[in-house]
Amino acid sequence: MIRVTISLVLMAVIARPLQAQNNIFLSQGKIEFERKVNQYAQMESTMDPGDEGWAELSKKIMGNKFKTDYFDLLFTRNKTLYRPGRESPDKPNQFFFQPPAQQNVIYADLDQEKSVSQKTVFEQVFLVEDTLRRIKWKITDETRPIAGFNCRRANALIMDSIYVVAFYTDEILTTGGPESFSGLPGMILGVALPHDHITWFATKVEATPVSEGQVAAPAKGKRVNNPGLLETIQKSLKDWGKQGRLYMQEVML
């Protein structure tokens, strides 16, 4: 009877969202990330002087200042799978195209330094097979709590010009994170691109068992590598100016 009671208690602990405690180190589980984009700030950064009227009209079309989406990150000790999560409460905007990265599925094999990403660009699905992005992080002494875990700040520059602020916890042993962010000594639970007005922050961490089959790489799409995808996007957006560069950056993250 005692064994049955202990088993039931353990099952209840595993199934609920986890609050970090001393001497608990996770190597598998599920993380929900909230991705937020400040649409107004992004739009204003691409406007030229004299476009104020167009800016105000665009804000009315967009509706909400912030675009919010949710993604799940499944992880084992050496693999992660980032994929769309629960439905966003935001109403879709009325532009003729959807913003990039809303349907990204990104698989990472951390031991093999391999990445397979499924990305939709203007209704065409690409399967991007490449190595993991190598990021030169600079770890700082700043800390903050995220989803019940104490996290340390690290800064980096990617794609030559994108400034990244990340927060990671060493209480989750897997060295992954949302999108293509990885390479810190623990799981990344928060990312901010302050000049690009995008953030990813974990809302909850669940200590649930994850099988190898649950973190399988996506398989559908036109096969390319990162340079091939970039070349394709550049050809399509060559006349888009600042808006094209912003769109391209979000696709390539």
Image: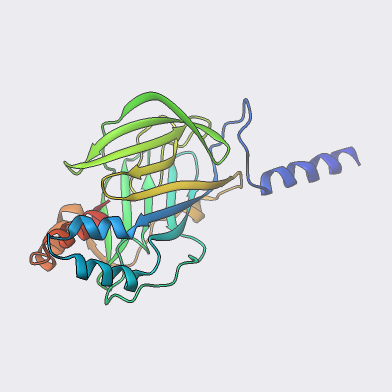
The residue closer to the viewer here, 112 or 227, is: 227
Residue at the location (48% across, 65% down)? Answer: 88
Residue 52 appears left or right of 12? left
Residue at the location (29% across, 43% down)? Answer: 132
Residue 216 appears left or right of 8? left
Residue 23 appears left or right of 64? right
Residue 46 place in picture, x, y as percent:
18, 58
The residue lying furthest to the top in this view is 141
Residue 157 place in picture, x, y as percent:
23, 37
Q: Is residue 1 visible?
A: yes
Residue 208 place in picture, x, y as percent:
61, 47
Q: Is residue 124 visible?
A: no
User: In the rendered picture of this protein, how many numbered marks are placed on residues?
Assistant: 0
Residue at the location (17% across, 60% down)? Answer: 47
Residue at the location (43% across, 41% down)? Answer: 190
Colour treatment of the image: rainbow
Instruction: Check the image and report above or below for 146 versus 218.
Output: above
The residue closer to the viewer here, 21 or 48, is: 48
Instruction: Check the image and report above or below for 34 versus 238.
Output: above
Q: Quadrant of the N terminus?
A: top right
Quarter of the figure with residue 168: top left
Quarter of the figure with residue 90: bottom left
Residue 86 place in picture, x, y as percent:
52, 63
